[in-house]
Image (spheres, rainbow, N blue to C red):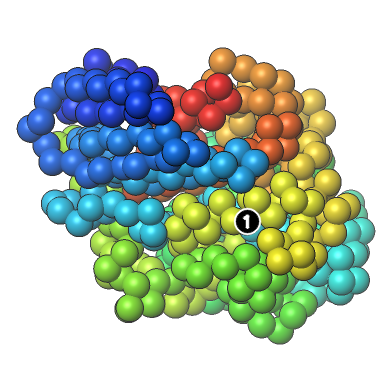
């Protein structure tokens, strides 16, 4: 743990840290940095070998990490859930932002498993608003032509509907999309589902269906499709399919009043340091008008780890119930992109990553901590959640500082390297 934190002390980003590692009586003690800022305590038990660390940070107020290697689980909770005071705990609740996407995709795939929808079915069967989209003839113009084929369920899952964000935000069709697809971390910026679909239908698509990978909007559409197919809210379907069977007790689209004392505040970095982005009693303290499949969930790190463990078990819950077919799990863990699509998505991908249903897939090892076959995604509120089949590992790191853009922060790379090692 101290190796992971020390570089932040050296760079002045982390005031200080103390670690005690006892390996069967062989004890290491390390203390670095300053005791100026208060901290919190994390305990990691590796089969009886215990690490204890006390930290505080002006850059990351707090964090919870869960690393499950084949059932051997490390849990660390450090820093503050709300500044000042309110220590972070393993059951602290976070806004997970785009780490919602894999769960939304898996929920839609349960409907495919049930035969309620088919991958090659036109989405307009349930989303008639998408029946006649217009498409930019070339990305740099608003000269429009009809779509050459219907948008399919597979397009929604693979983020190739034609709507979404490319690496160039200045393109005319992208500028037209921004008012309809605002920042997903601001869940109350979205109107009710049907009104959102009506507005989206008036936005020209940047590419023809199936042609290009584009970020974010397809995941919102997945959630809308799930609701239309089932006649229920997205949260109700997720609770039935995953949250209940997996014991994800805090996973939801808002935090009930009884749990607000465990809900973290969210911050952003401003010119004077950390600024409040959303308070515990803010945007997530009541149900939203539209439950967003692209990034609206709240949960604990342990909740997402339970979902990840189910994926690594081939879709089977701890009690033996099958929640997702082996074929659907296999599809989620397999890259679905072309080389051209990966190249156009490098603002969002790391070099050596592709995309599958709801998340990225590592295609090659890299010094950043990428491992071939690793699947999952990150969230713009400072969250990271991945599974690595080759090592049977689930790794979740939840923090509460909103990212300024799509780039991955250095501390997240450090966590990935820690897990990969």
Residue beneath disc 1? 307
What percent of the width, then of the height, locates residue 211? 81, 41
Point out the image quarter for the C terminus: top right
Foreground pick, 76 / 252: 76
Q: Is residue 227 left or right of residue 36?
A: right
Q: Is residue 346 above or below residue 175?
A: above
Q: Residue at x 61, y 73 (%)?
A: 244
Q: Residue at x 64, y 21 (%)?
A: 351
What percent of the width, then of the height, locates residue 234? 62, 73
What percent of the width, then of the height, locates residue 195? 58, 75
Q: Residue furthest bottom?
A: 231
Foreground pick, 192 / 401: 401
Q: Is residue 266 above or below residue 23?
A: below
Q: Secondary structure at mark 1?
A: helix
Q: Residue furthest front?
A: 25
Q: Is residue 367 left or right of residue 333?
A: left
Q: Is residue 121 above or below residue 413?
A: below
Q: Is residue 419 above or below residue 214?
A: above
Point out the image quarter for the N terminus: top left
């Amino acid at each position: 743990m101290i190796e992971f934190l020390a570089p932040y002390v050296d760079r002045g980003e982390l005031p200080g840290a103390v670690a005690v590692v006892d390996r069967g009586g062989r004890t290491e003690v390390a203390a670095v940095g300053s005791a100026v800022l208060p901290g919190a305590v994390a305990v990691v038990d590796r089969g009886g070998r215990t690490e204890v660390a006390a930290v505080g940070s002006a850059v990351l107020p707090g964090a919870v990490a869960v690393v499950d290697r084949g059932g051997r689980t490390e849990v660390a909770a450090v820093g503050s859930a709300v500044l000042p005071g309110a220590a972070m705990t393993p059951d602290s609740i976070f806004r997970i932002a785009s780490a919602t996407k894999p769960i939304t995709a898996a929920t839609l795939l349960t409907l495919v498993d049930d035969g309620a929808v088919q991958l090659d079915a036109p989405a307009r069967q349930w989303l008639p608003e998408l029946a006649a989209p217009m498409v930019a003839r070339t990305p740099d113009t608003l000269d429009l032509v009809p779509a050459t084929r219907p948008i399919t369920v597979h397009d929604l899952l693979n983020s190739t509907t034609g709507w979404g964000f490319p690496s160039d935000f200045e393109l005319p069709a992208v500028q037209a999309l921004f008012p309809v697809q605002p920042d997903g971390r601001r869940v109350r910026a979205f109107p009710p589902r049907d009104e959102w679909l009506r507005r989206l239908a008036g936005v020209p698509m940047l590419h023809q269906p199936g042609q290009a990978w584009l970020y974010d909007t397809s995941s919102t559409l997945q959630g809308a499709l799930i609701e239309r197919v089932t006649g229920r809210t997205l949260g109700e379907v997720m609770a039935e399919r995953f949250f209940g069977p997996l014991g994800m007790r805090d996973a939801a689209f808002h935090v009930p009043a009884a749990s607000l004392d465990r809900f973290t505040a969210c911050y952003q970095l401003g010119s004077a340091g950390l600024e409040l982005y959303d308070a515990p009693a803010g945007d997530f303290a009541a149900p939203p008008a539209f439950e967003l499949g692209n990034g609206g969930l709240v949960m604990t790190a342990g909740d997402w780890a339970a979902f990840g463990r189910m994926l690594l078990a081939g879709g089977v819950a701890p009690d033996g119930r099958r929640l997702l077919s082996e074929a659907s799990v296999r599809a989620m863990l397999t890259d679905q992109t072309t080389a051209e699509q990966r190249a156009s998505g490098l603002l969002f991908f790391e070099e050596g990553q592709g995309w599958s249903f709801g998340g990225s897939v590592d295609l090659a090892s890299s010094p950043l901590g990428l491992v071939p076959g690793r699947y999952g995604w990150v969230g713009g509120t400072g969250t990271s959640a991945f599974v690595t089949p080759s090592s049977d590992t689930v790794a979740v790191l939840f923090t509460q500082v909103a990212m300024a853009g799509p780039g991955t922060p250095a501390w997240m790379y450090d966590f990935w390297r820690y897990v990969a090692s």
